[in-house]
Image: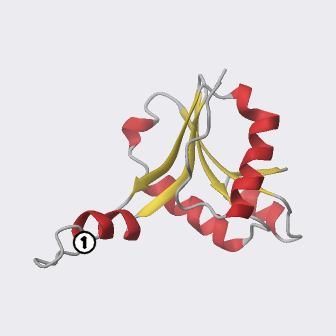
Amino acid sequence: MARHKPKIMFHMLPRDIAIWRRFLLQHEEEFTEFRYDVHVGPKLRLEDPNASWIGDFSERALSLRIDVVGFKAEEVWVIEVKPNAGLSALGQLMAYRYYLDPSIYAGKVLKACVVTDYARHYMPPLDRAFEIERVIV
């Protein structure tokens, strides 16, 4: 049982947040935990001796970020939340799945999922081919 209060999802836009809240209403109890804005992949850090804050800021802003990582007893879900999700969501999920630290899902099945409000006509065959779950809310 997840029983969590969603924290601020820093890089989700208002339409993303509305979709995510609908997902939580329907599926939250299936998960034990959610982590938001999970950074993965190579980091890019810019330094400026005149602005000490720029290093941390640039690393956060320029890194790949998974919207949500959801945990179930036997599964870890990499979740992209996007209205009218199409090819860009597919590409993001493929990259996130590739870059996710294996220690996060050790011993569990890794799933990739797009949570959206619409399925474009060409997406279901691609979802199957690339093992992407699609949840429409």
Query: How far from the left and from the top, in percent, is residue 88?
Result: 65, 72
Viewer-nearest residue: 28 or 13: 13
Residue at 74% across / 58% down in the picture? Answer: 127
Query: How far from the left and from the top, in percent, is residue 62?
Result: 38, 71
Viewport quadrant of the N terminus: top right
Q: Is residue 115 visible?
A: no
Q: Is residue 90 left or right of residue 96?
A: right
Which residue is the site of mark 1?
54
Query: How far from the left and from the top, in percent, is residue 115?
Result: 73, 53
Residue at 16% across / 69% down in the picture? Answer: 52
Q: Is residue 30 left or right of residue 137?
A: left
- Kind of residue at disc 1: Ile
Residue 83: name its quadrant. Answer: bottom right
Query: How far from the left and from the top, in percent, is residue 121?
Result: 89, 70
Q: Give the residue furthest to the front.
A: 50
Is residue 20 placed above or below 53 in the rendered structure?
A: above
Q: How many marks?
A: 1
Q: Is residue 107 visible?
A: yes
Q: Is residue 45 left or right of residue 122?
A: left
**What element does badge 1 sit on?**
helix
Q: Give the residue furthest to the left.
A: 49
Q: How is the image coloured?
A: secondary structure
Viewer-nearest residue: 109 or 60: 60
Is residue 79 placed above or below 84 in the rendered structure?
A: above
Viewer-nearest residue: 22 or 104: 22
Residue at 86% across / 62% down in the picture? Answer: 118
* Dot 1 crowding, Cα within 10 Å, few <14, some 14–19, many 20+: some
